[in-house]
Amino acid sequence: MATKQGTRTQEYSATPNQIVKAANGVDYAYRKMGEGAVPLVLLQHFRGNLDNWDPPLIDALATGRHVVTFDNVGVGATTGTTPNSVGQMAHDAIAYLDAMQYDQVDVLGFSIGSFVAQDIALIRPDLVRKLILASSAPKGAAGMHGWAPDVIGAVGQPETQPEGYLGVFFTPLSSSRDAGKQAMGRIFGRTTNPDEPTTWATRQAQYDAVCSWGIPNHALLERVSAIKVPVFVAQGDSDPMILPHYSHLLAGLIPQAQLKIYPDAAHGFLFQHAAEFSADVEAFLSGG
């Protein structure tokens, strides 16, 4: 799928990189496509940059609305140093949204991006109209203090290998593994105006933030009950990185939350089920 801009068909794989300077002195790298009154802003996964979104998903989301992807502070081509706390990442994301002069946005956060999305909704509640949390968990949930050794071993090494990525983002089933190989070909196949790679310093800071987020603290679970906007919680049923029961927990804690678990899918369910997930997101965002 693609969106029309005048007479030209635009696809995410060819969408140019842009830069905006924020009041915090940071130059943020971003891409945008599609049209619509309320932008849908996407927050990326651990170690991910602009290129790590699967183009068919973005193209589908942008069919009927304005979609924005960006690198937070210190990630990819965005300047500055990546902070080691989710709270500061949320403040940095808000600085970007202010620089773009967005009065209200819908937010889709994926993995660590979903942690940041929760904090944005708590820090600046009037900024967020609706919230989508993909492969997520609430702060302080038991069992989230760092990822399992095989998971961080697969995606946390200086050079992530294809098999490691496939093993975490997709299941061993042939349907999922084939979808993963196709997605990898698209994600890592961009040759025109690619983003800057994510550094080891960003990896370290992000994992510190993940571990801090996961320090068990039952009292902190009450935080998300303050999120009053509609929330769509989504996850694959075989996610080894953030276990599906955390999505059930989130959906039970957030007053206006709905939950969907996608079958035969892991951390990258939104790439594997791009058509279904994008349709679900559209229905959620356009619904009453």
Image (tube, rainbow, N blue to C red):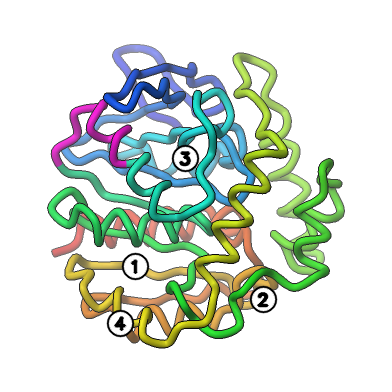
Q: Residue at 44% across / 75% down in the picture?
A: 260
Does dot 3 land on a helix, a strand or a loop? helix
Q: Amino acid at mark 1?
A: Phe
Labelled pair 1, 3 in contact (Cβ < 8 Å): no
Compare marks 4 and 2 and give the one earlier in the sequence. 4
Q: Which residue is mark 1?
A: 232
Please give the label number shown on residue 58.
3
**For the C terminus, which image quadrant?**
bottom left
Residue 142 among those drawn in magenta: no
C-alpha separation, residue under disc 1 versus residue under disc 4: 18 Å
Compare marks 4 and 3 and give the one earlier in the sequence. 3
Please give the range of residues in magenta. 94-103
Does dot 1 land on a helix, a strand or a loop? strand
Does dot 2 land on a helix, a strand or a loop? loop
Please give the label number shown on residue 238.
2
Q: Amino acid at mark 2?
A: Ser
C-alpha separation, residue under disc 4 versus residue under disc 3: 33 Å
Q: Nearer the viewer, residue 85 or 28?
A: 85
Q: Which residue is mark 4?
A: 222
Q: Classify mark 1: residues with Cα within 10 Å, few (<14), some (14-19) or many (20+).
A: many
Q: Amino acid at mark 4?
A: Glu
Q: Residue at 60% across / 65% down in the picture?
A: 211
Q: Amino acid at mark 3?
A: Ile
